Amino acid sequence: MPSLPTLKPGRPVGVVGLGIMARGMVANLKKAGFVVHGFSRTREKCADLIADGLIWHDSPGELAAAVDAVITMVGYPTDVEEVYFGDQGILGAARPGTLLIDMTTSAPSLAERLAEAAAAKGCAALDAPVSGGDVGARNGTLAIMVGGAEDAFEAARPLFEAMGQTIARLGPAGAGQHTKMVNQTVIAGTILGVAEALAYADKAGLDQSAVLDVIGQGAAGGFQLNVLGKRMVEGDFAPGFFVHHFLKDLGIAQQEAGQRGLDLKALKLAIAQFTRHAQAGGREDGTQGIYQSYLR
């Protein structure tokens, strides 16, 4: 395989999918000195990024041909397939030696397929989903869980260090996605617990903010309570991570667990609760929007 790129300030890096999370990642890549190229479905929504120096391309393939590394951060596994394998996709245009990093939360089997297809093209692929939400993306403090070859991981390290704080290679292709399923399973139960606990605090006549200040410093503390719990109390249900994307993740986790003979009851409950919330109009909420289910 051709040698992998040396990724350093001044080198071109592409980002495909410029939604909530990717915007923070783009800002941090630029701050680290990389020349950032971009593509998303709707150019008009990216006008501010273009005005701020993002080099726009009209297709994922056009972008891939111009950069040393491509980062994809799209919505669903079908979107991953489209941007990599489609008619104007990345794999059809990327130069040998290009590093392909899918940071979408997607199916482990698709990550394995992508790694095989990339290798056949003389490229290297990593699955590198993240955790930390919009706050972590903006602050460059994401947890990045990576699957793929060791040499590709080391080549990508400068990009990961620009975007994240906790960075680990967990194994071969697909291992990053499996780790993200573990992460989402933990969050599934935790976010329901936070919503239920705050509903209890409200019905008990407690000052919810005061409760958060106290228990957030104890064993219950963490991002779901300290950050998203605060948003629940403030009635801020704007998306840092969409409910419909969370349901996609939980569906993948349930499928992967089932294939391994696991019956994860808390995960099933979370899927049922979030599905009801989405059907009631909360599809575009952030995950903290589940709190509204306890107010009805």
Image (tube, rainbow, N blue to C red):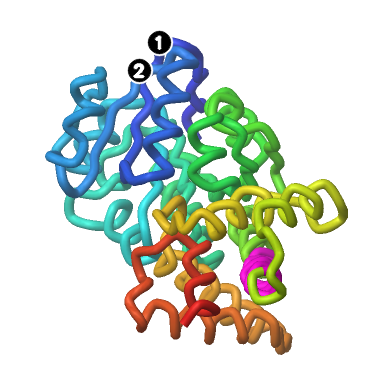
Residue 204 % position (x, y)? 71, 74
Check disc 2 and report the residue beneath it: 35
Asked if marks 1 and 2 touch (Cβ < 8 Å), the reply is yes
Q: Nearer the viewer, residue 296 or 281?
A: 296
| Residue 198 included in the magenta stretch of the image | yes
Residue, disc 1? 10
The answer to whether residue 279 shows anywhere in this view is yes
Magenta span:
186-201
**Which residue is depicted at the point 66% across and 52% down?**
209
Q: Nearer the viewer, residue 292 or 174?
A: 292
Amino acid of disc 2: Val
With respect to residue 261, does 160 lie above or below? above
Is residue 116 among the parts visible in the rendering? no
Q: Residues within 10 Å of mark 2 (few under 14, many from 20)?
A: many
Going 49% across and 33% down the picture, which residue do you hit? 138
Crowdedness of circle 1 by 10 Å Cα count: few (<14), some, many (20+)? few
